[in-house]
């Protein structure tokens, strides 16, 4: 307001800047929380012989540039979670049935129920994380560039 003497104009610009900063930080914090929840759930579901999918390992290099790219990543994460659940509840029991008969199939179905429930939840939380990240990067592409430069 010192440049042109308009106090209301200065207040309006300050308020807009404040709202934008609060929005960006809220989206960023929400994205980090959903990423953490997805990682914890993935660690919970992953068995000793399979390596857990790490969202944070691919986070910096595959950051979506905008909301559209975030939704594309989200679609992939959600479908991966649903496909993984379907595999655990259908394909694994069929293999066990062929290998060990009905008892093996029943045992694998019982073991697969928690996985079948949690895998879509993991996919959904990863999807939300990518969507929020795309939204944030679309609003502030300079933050995305800074994060990418930091890890190169």
Image (spheres, helix red, strand yellow):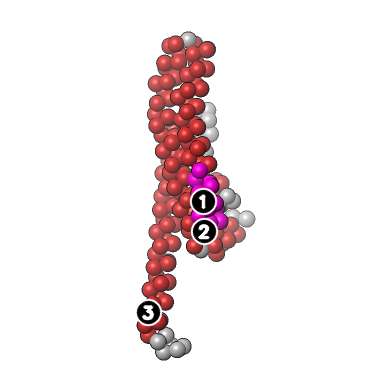
- Residue at the top extreme, as displayed: 101
Q: Earlier in the sequence, mark 3 or mark 1?
A: 3
Task: Name the image quarter holding the N terminus.
Answer: bottom left
User: Can residue 57 be seen at all in this image of the molecule?
Assistant: yes
As drawn, 104 above or below 5: above
User: Can residue 143 be seen at all in this image of the molecule?
Assistant: no
Q: Residue at x 53, y 53 (%)?
A: 68
Question: What residue did someone put label 2 on?
Answer: 137
Cα gap from disc 2 to disc 1, whole angstroms: 9 Å
Cα gap from disc 3 to disc 2, whole angstroms: 26 Å
Q: Secondary structure at mark 3?
A: helix
- Residues packed near mark 1 inside 10 Å, few (<14), some (14 to 19) or many (20 plus): many
Question: What residue did someone put label 1 on?
Answer: 70
Task: State which region is magenta.
Answer: 64-75
Question: What residue did someone put label 3 on?
Answer: 11
Residue 26: % across, % down: 40, 59
């Amino acid at each position: 307001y010192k440049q042109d003497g308009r106090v209301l104009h200065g207040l309006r610009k300050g308020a807009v800047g404040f709202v934008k900063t609060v929005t960006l930080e809220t989206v960023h914090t929400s994205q980090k929380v959903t990423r953490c929840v997805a990682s914890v759930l993935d660690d919970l579901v992953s068995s000793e012989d399979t390596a857990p999918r790490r969202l944070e390992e691919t986070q910096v290099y595959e950051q979506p540039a905008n909301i559209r790219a975030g939704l594309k990543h989200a679609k992939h994460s959600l479908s991966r979670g649903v496909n993984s659940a379907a595999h655990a509840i259908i394909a694994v029991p069929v293999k066990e049935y062929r290998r060990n008969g009905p008892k093996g199939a029943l045992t694998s179905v019982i073991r697969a129920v928690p996985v079948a429930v949690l895998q879509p939840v993991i996919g959904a939380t990863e999807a939300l994380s990518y969507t929020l990240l795309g939204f944030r990067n679309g609003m502030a592409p300079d933050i995305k560039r800074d994060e990418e430069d930091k890890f190169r």
